[in-house]
Structure formats: C-alpha cells, structure tokens
C-alpha cells in the first residue's frame, strides 16, 4: 500500500493494513482492510476513528493518543474488532509507529482469526490490557514531566552539569539504585559510578559530603 508516496508493506499474506493519526483518525487502508471491515469505499473508511472498529464497550477505554505504551510492537496480539454491520470478529493485531515525511503515524496490521474462539473472553482480556497500558502511559508521562522539572532546577543551580549528569542526578533524587539508574539510561553500573564521581567533582563536594543531600538542597 502506498501512503503519501511511501510504501507500507504487509508482513503476512493478505493482511489488512490501516494507517491512522496518533489520535486514531483513519487516513488510509488497503483493499483487504475494506473487505475485512466491510466498508464499500476508502472514502467511507476514512471517515472513521480507530475506536469505531472496536467493540462498543471498548470505546470508553480507547486512549486519546496512541503512545508507544499502547502498541503491539513486538508481536501480533489477539484482539476483537467490529465490522461496519456491528459483527464482532477475532483477529491478530500488530501495531507500530512509522514516521513519514517528518510526521508520525500509527500503522496497524490485522489478520482475521478463522477458527472458533471465545469472543467475550477476548473482549474482557482486551479491556484489561488497554487499562494496564493506559496506566503505564500515564506513569511514563509523569516521569517525563518530573525529569523536565528537575532538570531545569539542577541546570540552574549547577550550569556545569551535562544533560547526562542531570539525568543521573534526577534518578539519585528519586532514590534509584545504581543498577536501576543504569537500566533507565541504558548504561553500565560502572558508568553510573563514574558519573557520580564526576558530578561530585563538579559540585565541589569534599570526602564525607553526601551527594544526594547536596542535590536536595539545590532544588
């Protein structure tokens, strides 16, 4: 399928492809998508939001903005979708972000499950999963806000600190262990120890003075 001059390829044979904005507005779909969801034309399909393809009881849980936490990036997951006539069907769904001409879009790959399954059970599991993902997205958003706020305060108090130094300081203030900081910043624990030593030197701390205490006093 071609979208804005860029080819979006099927992963499996004859799967439906749907392209949407991050708020769920459908922008494109291939012929398999029109057949799967039973819409007569691409024009009618593009009038929809992704939540219109979901069971009615799922609408209230559908996120306003599809962040990375909401996506099935690593594999196909079992979901329940809804056709234009209201019929529910089970499918395997793989979703990811794709940047096209500087704009980020949501791409969905949908394969209908032909064998008999428990639709009601899948719907329940689907609702639980999306709530868990929404919680994780909110936590991620709060972490980003906290990091920005702390970074501004630390940068003002200690202009000599680099961006990486400030990130280490932020997690130290959150009482993260060196191992946890290493995981968050994708560095080694030795890298965290080196950063702590470097930060102490920039702050002019003497032996015996606590780094965390000095950071707390600065904010």
Image (cartoon, grey):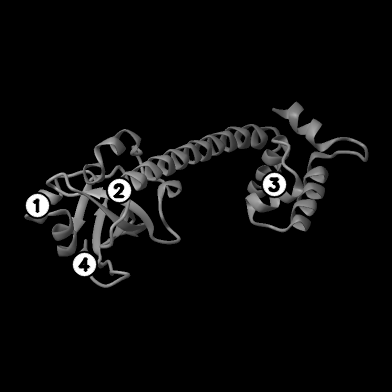
Outermost left residue? 40
Q: Residue 215's quadrant in the figure? A: top right
Q: Position of residue 173 (x, y in %)?
A: 71, 35
Please tell me whether mark 4 or mark 2 is closer to you in this view.
2
Q: Nearer the viewer, residue 200 or 124?
A: 124
Outermost right residue? 207
Q: Position of residue 187 (x, y in %)?
A: 68, 57
Is 172 situated left or right of 132 in this image?
Answer: right
Q: Identify the residue at image location x=36%, y=45%.
A: 121
**Marks 4/1: CA distance?**
16 Å
**Marks 2/3: CA distance?**
50 Å
Q: Is residue 61 above or below residue 102?
A: above
Does label 4 or label 2 sit earlier along the sequence?
A: 4
Of helix, strand and loop, which one carries label 4?
loop
- Residue 1, disc: 4
Q: Identify the residue at image location x=28%, y=69%.
A: 10
**Residue for badge 3:** 165
- Residue 119, disc: 2
């Amino acid at each position: 399928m071609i979208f804005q001059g860029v080819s979006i390829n099927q992963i499996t044979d004859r799967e439906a492809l749907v392209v949407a904005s991050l708020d769920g507005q459908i922008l494109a779909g291939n012929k398999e998508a029109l057949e799967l969801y039973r819409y007569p034309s691409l024009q009618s399909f593009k009038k929809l939001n992704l939540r219109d393809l979901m069971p009615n009881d799922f609408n209230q849980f559908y996120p306003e903005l599809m962040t990375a936490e909401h996506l099935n990036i690593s594999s196909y997951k079992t979901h329940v979708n809804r056709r234009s006539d209201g019929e529910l069907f089970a499918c395997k769904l793989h979703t990811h972000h794709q940047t096209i001409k500087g704009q980020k879009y949501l791409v969905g790959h949908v394969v209908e499950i032909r064998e008999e399954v428990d639709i009601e059970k899948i719907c329940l599991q689907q609702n639980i999963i999306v709530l868990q993902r929404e919680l994780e997205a909110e936590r991620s958003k709060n972490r980003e806000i906290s990091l920005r706020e702390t970074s501004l305060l630390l940068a003002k108090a200690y202009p000599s600190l680099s961006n990486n130094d400030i990130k280490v300081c932020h997690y130290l203030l959150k009482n993260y262990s060196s191992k946890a900081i290493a995981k968050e910043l994708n560095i080694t624990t030795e890298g965290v120890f080196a950063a702590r030593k470097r930060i102490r030197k920039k702050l002019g701390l003497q032996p015996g003075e606590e780094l965390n205490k000095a950071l707390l006093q600065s904010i």
